[in-house]
Image (cartoon, rainbow, N blue to C red):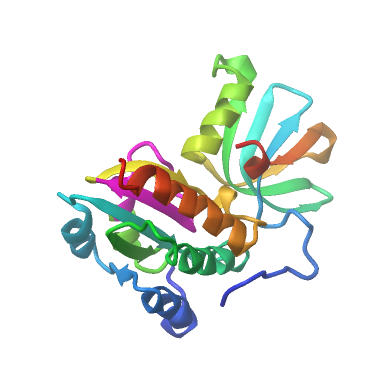
């Protein structure tokens, strides 16, 4: 059951402040990810304080890196249920977890950061992993 | 909404995704919730049964680390008497 919208509003705002586009329905997910060309980051947001509370600032830090995905979108697990379920259909073999971060190139997942790779880590460490992944998968030589 | 969030009153591993190895054929991967007189409570748990021809435990853990947990139990209690080792999945990736 979704949380009170007032509770999650600051978590949504944290994402949109850093430039992520919120996808709140399956149709919005299809429009953004289906037939997508180029590079994209999909952030699966979550109310989980111990993981998402570090993942969001980690992404904010990583988005200051010199190499970036062309598009940054977000769905809210446990809140926008249809949108999150549809986004996960694009993640192939990667099992649902939240928070999580998928990097896509031309619609295919090239890198995935699960919740267990976020838990207990400081935002700076997660951001460093993300920046390295941006270089590897979205860098000019790719 | 950002930064470290601690859980006063909870176990250190509360909310952390762990690999729970038993002294039998079963290995569990899921979120550690708590421990009480019934055992270790885990959430969103996948189970590997070495006796059921599921392949090696190490391969199961490796795939869980890379692709995530194929959860088939929302909540599961592992009796404390069979728990051999609990490790963070994130440290095994």
Q: Is residue A18 above or below residue B82?
A: below
At a point 56% along the width and 65% down the height, the residue shown is A48
Between A53 and B69, the residue placed more toward the observer is A53
Would you say A23 lies left or right of B19 here? Answer: left
Residue B51, by quadrant, is top right
Q: Position of residue A97 (x, y in %)?
A: 48, 51
Residue B65, by quadrant, is top right
Would you say A26 lies left or right of A111 here? Answer: left
Between A96 and B34, the residue placed more toward the observer is A96
Q: Position of residue B17 (x, y in %)?
A: 63, 47
At a point 43% along the width and 71% down the height, the residue shown is A2
Would you say A114 lies left or right of B22 here? Answer: left
At a point 41% along the width and 43% down the height, the residue shown is A136
Residue B14, by quadrant, is bottom right
Between B11 and A68, the residue placed more toward the observer is A68
* Residue B44 colored in magenta in the image: no
Where are the magenta residues, as a range?
A87-105
**Residue B90 visible in image:** yes
């Amino acid at each position: 059951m979704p949380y009170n919208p007032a509770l999650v509003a600051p978590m949504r705002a944290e994402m949109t402040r850093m430039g992520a586009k919120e996808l709140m329905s399956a149709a919005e997910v299809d429009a953004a990810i289906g037939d997508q060309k180029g590079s994209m980051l999909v952030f699966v947001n979550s109310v989980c304080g111990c993981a998402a509370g570090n993942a969001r600032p980690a992404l904010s830090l990583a988005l200051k890196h010199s190499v970036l995905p062309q598009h940054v979108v977000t769905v809210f697990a446990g809140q926008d249920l249809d949108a999150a379920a549809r986004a996960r259909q694009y993640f192939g073999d990667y099992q649902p977890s939240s928070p999580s971060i998928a990097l896509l190139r031309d619609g295919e997942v090239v890198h995935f950061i699960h919740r267990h790779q976020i838990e207990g880590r400081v935002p700076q460490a997660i951001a460093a992993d993300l920046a390295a992944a941006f270089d590897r998968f979205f860098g000019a030589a790719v | 909404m950002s930064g470290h969030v601690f859980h006063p009153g909870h176990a250190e591993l509360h909310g952390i995704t762990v690999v729970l190895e038993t002294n039998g054929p079963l290995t569990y991967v899921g979120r550690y919730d708590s421990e009480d007189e019934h055992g270790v409570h885990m959430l969103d748990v996948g189970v590997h049964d070495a006796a059921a021809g599921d392949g090696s435990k190490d391969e199961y853990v490796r795939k869980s680390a890379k692709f995530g947990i194929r959860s088939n139990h929302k909540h599961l209690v592992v009796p404390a008497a069979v728990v051999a080792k609990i490790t963070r999945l994130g440290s095994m990736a």
